[in-house]
Image (cartoon, grey):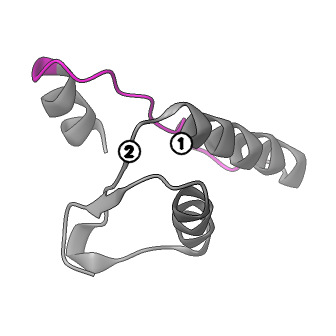
Amino acid sequence: MRAASLELTFAGVIVVAPDEAGELITDEQKAVLDALHLRKIDLADRVLVVNPGGYIGESTRREIAYARAGGKPVSFTDPV
């Protein structure tokens, strides 16, 4: 995700990326991050899903559905 963010930034794109916890977090902290990710999707013009090898996790699937429901174009780094 960091590499894609940097590449887009150098291409002049404003990147609003989800935060990475990088460690074990509580259920409450996960709920806060999940809600913030949806607000970031609200701010975005489009959504790029970084999905190495085509993998998409449960949270990301919800975020994709949310983006599509809001009319946001969704693209992927790898075929799904």
Secondary structure of the residue carrying numbered label 2: loop
Is residue 23 on the magenta stretch? Answer: yes
- Amino acid on which disc 1 is placed: Gly
Quarter location, residue 63: bottom right
Q: Quadrant of the C terminus?
A: bottom left
Relative image position of residue 6 (x, y in whole percent): 20, 27
Quarter location, residue 40: top right
Instruction: Let me know if residue 21 appears in the view.
Output: no
Toward the right, the furthest residue is 28
Relative image position of residue 22 (x, y in whole percent): 53, 42
Which residue: 54% across, 35% down? 19
Relative image position of residue 57 (x, y in whole percent): 51, 73
Q: Closer to the observer: label 2 or label 1?
A: 2
Q: Does residue 67 sit above or below 32 in this rendering?
A: below
- Relative side of 32 to 38, left or right: right
Q: Front-most of 24 and 69?
A: 69
Return the residue at label 2.
Answer: 46
Magenta part of the chain:
10-25
Secondary structure of the residue carrying numbered label 1: loop
Quarter location, residue 9: top left
- Amino acid on which disc 2 is placed: Arg
Which residue: 32% across, 21% down? 14
Q: Main secondary structure of the magenta part?
A: loop
The crowding category of the residue bearing disc 1, from other C-alpha atoms within 10 Å (few below 14, some 14 to 19, many at least 20), is: few
Q: Quadrant of the N terminus?
A: top left
Return the residue at label 1.
Answer: 22
The tag earlier along the polypeptide, 2 or 1, is 1
In space, the residues marked 2 and 1 are separated at their CA atoms by 25 Å
Instruction: Let me know if residue 75 appears in the view.
Output: yes
